[in-house]
Structures are given as structure tokens and as C-alpha cells.
Image (cartoon, rainbow, N blue to C red):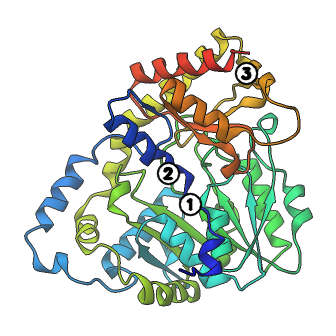
Amino acid sequence: MLLSSRVKGISDSITMKLNEKALNLNDDGKVIYNLSGGQLPIKPPPEFIEKVHHQLNFLKSYQYSPVAGFPALRKKIMKYVSELRSLPPEVFEEETDCIVSNGSKHSIYNSLGALIDPSDEVILLAPYWVSYPEMIKFWGGVPVVVNSNVFDGFVPAIEDIRKVISARTRVIILNSPNNPAGIHYSEAWMKEFASFLAEFPDLVVISDEVYSEITYFDPKPSYFYQYDRSLLKRTIIIQAISKSLASTGLRLGYAIAPIPIVNAMSKIQGQTTSGPNSLIQRALIDFDFNLIEPFLAPVKHHVRQNAANLREKFREANLGHCWYQSTSAFYFMIDFSRTPMFARFESDHKDYSYQIADELLQNEGITVVPGLDFGLPNSARIALVIEEVPFLEALSKIVKYLNTI
């Protein structure tokens, strides 16, 4: 059977494939330490569960919503985000709108569809989320990568971004807090980025802020448009309930953007998925968003503790040079190339992250995500979310492996 060239050029989601493989091995009776998961292994807040339960009795909770989502929820979301970003509510009241989609991935995909034509360039800041390049390519765009490294705290230089701007540049995707690095860009960086954007008035920013409420070291994340509100006229803010309400499987995200962009995204959504989950939308209309912060407080404490455990395990194993301070989201990037284990591989500038990840899974029962798909070869992402005791057990296995020549 002949498949389209479009789908032939798209790679599978490595995180989804690894998660599935780990589940299968676990079902076969093997003890698996799953450090690949991009989700919190806990239930959502009980108050939110109760709102969902309440909606089960109403017929309209099962019927179509407007394509862009229920107006009451969209207004509530814009008010909530304005409060989170210390912005006056009126900044979203005139030229801006909100569209609710089937997860933040859906929102980003629709955003790119609304903005880029074939051969248009989209700037990515490495490390980047694995799905960005594939979504860009699916719409016919060209990913242009700006690199960073652990020595710079995985923060790209503004000057390096400026160097890759071309006549075909349309969009830059900003992901802070960052998946996979587990860091967020500083206030100073965001202010410099705002000044940089003033030089390129046609450049649109997709600001992926899905992890903005999961930060465990001050100062908290801030954003470029807080320092220059005029930039909201060409900014798409992406958020979701996936991380903040531990609800990845409920598939509900949203975008706040200028009205013409929201209208374009709504056209795409209307012809593909229609409106998002009506039941969950109605539950969110009744749910008190102010309960999110206390719900996440123990989560952030747990992630911070696991981050401290990682630091100590690396120090004890004389791998302190491979450690950096993660501050947000719930990830950490291990640089294999700076460990004794890497001497087994040829110094030929090839990527061995897939091979190393497979060895960890088959020999140690540990799943990690190869770093090449994040734009960082010879590395891997681990999640800091599993319970402390199994996390410590997994770390002991990892550092032993990294020190084995």
C-alpha cells in the first residue's frame, strides 16, 4: 500500500514508544523503573474529580461544544493566565482570544498550521520538545535549531538566535520551563529576548508554558511579554491541564493568541477534531483554579527532593561534573559523553543515545528517553516524578552503569 510522502517523513514519538515498551515489559513480570514518563503518577485534585463526576449526570456534557470551546471557559482561562502573569485582565479583552484544544500538542500543531507555509522556517531552541520538529515538517516548514549546552545551563544565547534569522523565518518556539532540560530562562534573558523581538516585527512567538506552574526554585518563570505587552499582538501562549492538574489522559489544552490566529486555528480544528471534550470543559468551568497551587505544592516538594537525591548520588559516584541544577518541570538531562562508560564507544561524533537507552532498559530495567530526539546527542532525559525509594534504586543502577568502563 502506498502511503503519503508526508506521513513517511514523520517519525514516531519516541516518548510514547518507550512508555509503551516499558508497560509491556512490566506486564511480562520484569521490574521496570520508568524514568521516561512525562506525567505525574498521581490523581488530579479531588475537587476537580468531583466536578467531573457531577457533570456525568447532564446530557449536554456529552454533546458538541463550540469548536473553540465554551465561551465561559475561554474567558475564565484568559482571566486566570492574566493573574498568573501579573497582567491586568484587559490585556486579553480586546484583540486577543482563547481556543481550547485536545491537549497542548494539538494547540501547537494548530498554531503552526495557522502560521507557516511550505519552506517557511521555524526556530527551535535546543534542547527542544521531541514533537516540535515533526509538527513543523508535517506542515511543510523547516526547523532551524539554535543549540545550547549544559555549561550555559541549557540557555541559548540571543546572539545565536539572531544569526539564524532569514527572510523565511516566520516563528520561534519558546519552551520555558523547558522539556527536557528542567530549567527555565531567567528574567534577564526574557528581557533581552523582548528587546530582540522588537528588531523583527514580523516574527511570531509560540510560548509553550505547559510547565510554568511546576517550578521548585525561585525566582519563578517570567515571560518576555510581561516586559513589553505590545508583544502579545504576535504571541501564542500555550497551556494545558495535563501537568498542572495531573490529567494528561484527559487531553485538554488551550492557546491564547491574537484573534486572527485563533480564528485560523479554529478553522483547522473545526475540520479535523471539532471541539474538545465537553465533559471536561464543563467541569473546568465549575472548578476553582486557585486550588491548583496548593495541589501542586507537595508535587514540587517531591520533585525537588528527587532532584537533590540525584545531585547526591552523582556526587557520591564522582559524577558531580555531569550534574546541573534543575529548577522546574520534572526532568533532568544526563550527558553520557562526560562519563567513564562512554569510553566504550568510538570518538566519531556519532550518537549512541539509542543504544545506551536500550542497554539501560534491557540490562537494568530503566527507561530513559534518548537525547538525540531533543536535539542533544549522546544524552538522555530522565523524569523526577516516581516515588523516592524506587527513584533512589534506579539512580544507584544508573550511576553504576555510568561508571562501568
Q: Which mark is residue 17?
A: 2
Mark 1 touches mark 3? (CB < 8 Å)? no
Q: Is residue 305 left or right of residue 170?
A: left
Is 191 situated above or below 154? below
Number of disc labels? 3
Callout 2 amino acid: Lys
Mark 2 surroundings: few (<14), some (14-19) or many (≥20) residues within 10 A: few
Residue pictured at 64% horizontal, 9% vertical: 316
Task: Provide the residue designation for mark 1.
Answer: 12
Residue pictured at 73% horizontal, 51% vertical: 375
Is 45 situated above or below 382? below
Q: Earlier along the polypeptide chain: callout 2 or callout 1?
A: 1
Q: Is residue 204 visible to us here?
A: yes
Q: Residue furthest front?
A: 1
- Position in image of residue 314 (x %, y %): 64, 17
CA distance for labels 1 and 3 = 28 Å
CA distance for labels 2 and 3 = 25 Å
Task: Provide the residue designation for mark 3.
Answer: 341
Q: Earlier along the polypeptide chain: callout 1 or callout 3?
A: 1
Corner quadrant of residue 236 = bottom right
- Position in image of residue 154 (x %, y %): 74, 42
- Position in image of residue 72 (x %, y %): 31, 77
Q: Nearer the viewer, residue 111 or 200?
A: 111
Q: Is residue 218 visible to us here?
A: no
Q: Which quadrant does the C terminus fall into?
A: top right
Mark 2 touches mark 1? (CB < 8 Å)? yes
Is 86 situated above or below 110? above
| Helix, strand or loop under label 1 | loop
Callout 1 amino acid: Asp
